[in-house]
Image: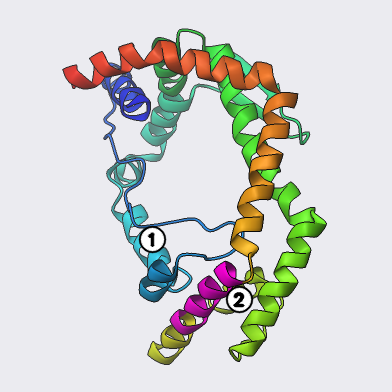
Amino acid sequence: MLYEAEQLLTQSCMRARGFRIWVVPRTPLPEDRDFPYVVDDTRWAREHGYGSDMQRRRDQVRASDPNRRYFQSLSPADRMRGMDALHGKRDGGRLEVTVPNGMNFTRYTEGCTARAQEQLYGDLEGWFRSSTITNVLDDMGRGKVFAEQEFKDAVKDWAACMRKRGFRHATPEETRRAFSEPSDAAARTKEIRTAVAEADCARSSGLSDTALRLEKRQRDRLAEQYAPEYETRKRLERVALPRARAIVERG
């Protein structure tokens, strides 16, 4: 709801500035999934392997994206004006935030993206700061899971399970790299067979449960440490929901 409303507000803003933009689904491929630690869904693995078929479909979606095609169709000068209209001019107003991992993020305040968020949430600065920081914290929490000894021990148990099935891969990351781009049907068959074994071993070895438990622990710690940012985001989302509902209903 919030995403669609923001897209509709952005579309209206761009139209007023003489440009077109289309509302596209946030998840154009609903069956596409992210397995940050290990593939642990046997049914999904049996159909998609490690997702090499998904990558091809992502490329197709990106190539057919109406907004991308529209901006590519513009002259260089109009494309620059259109991007300035959407994102804001670099010499205009800006907001900046430094996130806990030290990275800096900037939001130009005069673009349609910023205007839409201001209309929707009522506090552009608060939304930009809280959403940017909490998004990064989610990634940081996952990174901390990989560093935990419990996770490393569970990976060893998973690797032992894989060896019993004839697959000598030390980590799930290693298997994913091995099948990032299957070259032919035989490679695709091997990808699926390996992914199914990985998913079975993720369950039987306890790696999947361990990763989820550690992720929750890290998430809870970060939520406590950065409570003001999480509380601000939840408050702004709660306030924005009635506005979003009305915007979507109007279309």
In magenta, the rendered stretch is: 192-204
Q: Residue at x 45, y 20 (%)?
A: 111
Q: Which mark is residue 175?
A: 2
Residue 246 in view (yes/no):
yes
User: Please, is residue 140 above or below residue 31 in the view?
Assistant: above
5 sits to left or right of 106: left
The picture places residue 249, in percent across and down from the top left corner, at 18, 19
Amino acid type, callout 2:
Thr
The picture places residue 46, in percent across and down from the top left corner, at 39, 75
At mark 2, the secondary structure is helix
- In front: 47, or 28? 47
Amino acid type, callout 1:
Asp
Q: Earlier in the sequence, mark 1 or mark 2?
A: 1
At mark 1, the secondary structure is helix
Q: Main secondary structure of the magenta part?
A: helix
Instruction: Answer with the quarter of the image where residue 21 lies.
Output: top left
Residue that badge 1 annotates: 59
Q: Residue at x 43, y 31 (%)?
A: 83
Instruction: Answer with the quarter of the image where residue 102 lies.
Output: top right
Q: Residue at x 51, y 65 (%)?
A: 40
User: Please, is residue 210 above or below residue 88 in the view?
Assistant: below
Asked if residue 111 is among those painted magenta in the image, a careful observer would answer no
Q: CA distance from mark 1 to mark 2?
A: 22 Å
